[in-house]
């Protein structure tokens, strides 16, 4: 059976989360995840840290596809612009490695992973832990990146794409 390795990215200027999963048939398996901290320097240097760090993640893990969370509009236009630049650096890291990039809104990711597009961060973290059989709850940024990869692995189809045997869905949660 063919496997596909997917890198999920949750871009942020301060912290960029990443997560790598492998999909084989209907099964998904956790490979790695983490956070890239860009520091407090000048913007170009911080973007360089994101770009080079994600290229290293790509080279070390050899994903075939990349899923990136789309920017939402903040109340503060400056924050939105900075987030967009971090997102651009993340996309460039994938494109420089000749990888296809899919983009998903936070609403799509939450709907696919939790079953509720307005789920809290804690719900996303818990569902990622359950779906990937992790021993602990991942950090919010790593969980968002893994959720993005899971969303892509299942075509953004929501819980219908997951093996949920043994669980019941109530209010967008597996119980």
Image (tube, helix red, strand yellow):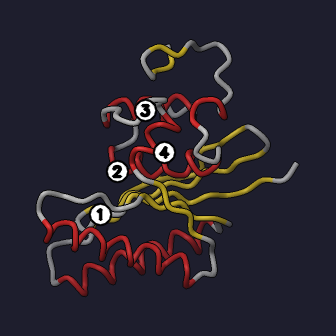
- Residue to which mark 3 is pinned: 136
Check the image and report above or below for 43 versus 33: below
Q: Where residue 97 sits in the image (x, y, percent)?
A: 60, 81
The span from disc 4 to disc 1 (Cα, nearest Å) is 15 Å
The tally of labels here is: 4
- Residue to which mark 2 is pinned: 141
Is disc 2 surrounded by few (<14), some (14 to 19) or many (20+) residues within 10 Å? many
- Residue 117 location, quadrant: top left
User: Residue drawn 50% across and 54% down?
Assistant: 19
User: Residue drawn 37% across and 70% down?
Assistant: 87
Choose mark 4 or mark 2, whichever is in front.
4
Choose mark 4 or mark 3, whichever is in front.
4
Mark 1–mark 2 CB contact (< 8 Å): yes
In this rendering, position of residue 142 left or right of residue 75: right
Secondary structure type for disc 3: loop
4 or 1: tag closer to the N-terminus: 1
The span from disc 3 to disc 2 (Cα, nearest Å) is 14 Å
- Residue to which mark 4 is pinned: 147
Residue 94 is tagged as none
Mark 3–mark 2 CB contact (< 8 Å): no
User: Residue drawn 53% across and 38% down?
Assistant: 112
- Residue to which mark 1 is pinned: 12
């Amino acid at each position: 059976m063919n496997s596909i390795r997917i890198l999920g990215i949750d871009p942020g200027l301060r912290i960029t989360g990443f997560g790598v999963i492998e999909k084989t048939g209907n099964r998904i398996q956790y490979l790695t995840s983490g956070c890239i901290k860009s520091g407090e320097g000048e913007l170009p240097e911080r973007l360089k840290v994101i770009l080079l760090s994600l290229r290293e993640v790509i080279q070390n893990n050899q994903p075939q596809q990349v899923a990136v969370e789309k920017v939402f509009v903040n109340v503060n236009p400056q924050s939105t612009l900075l987030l967009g630049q971090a997102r651009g650096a993340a996309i460039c890291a994938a494109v420089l490695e000749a990888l296809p990039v899919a983009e998903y809104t936070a609403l799509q990711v939450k709907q696919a992973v939790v079953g509720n597009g307005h789920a809290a961060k804690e719900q996303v973290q818990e569902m990622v832990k359950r779906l990937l059989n992790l021993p602990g709850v991942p950090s919010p940024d790593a969980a968002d990146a893994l959720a993005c990869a899971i969303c892509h692995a299942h075509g953004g189809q929501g819980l219908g794409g997951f093996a949920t045997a043994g669980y019941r869905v109530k209010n967008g949660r597996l119980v």
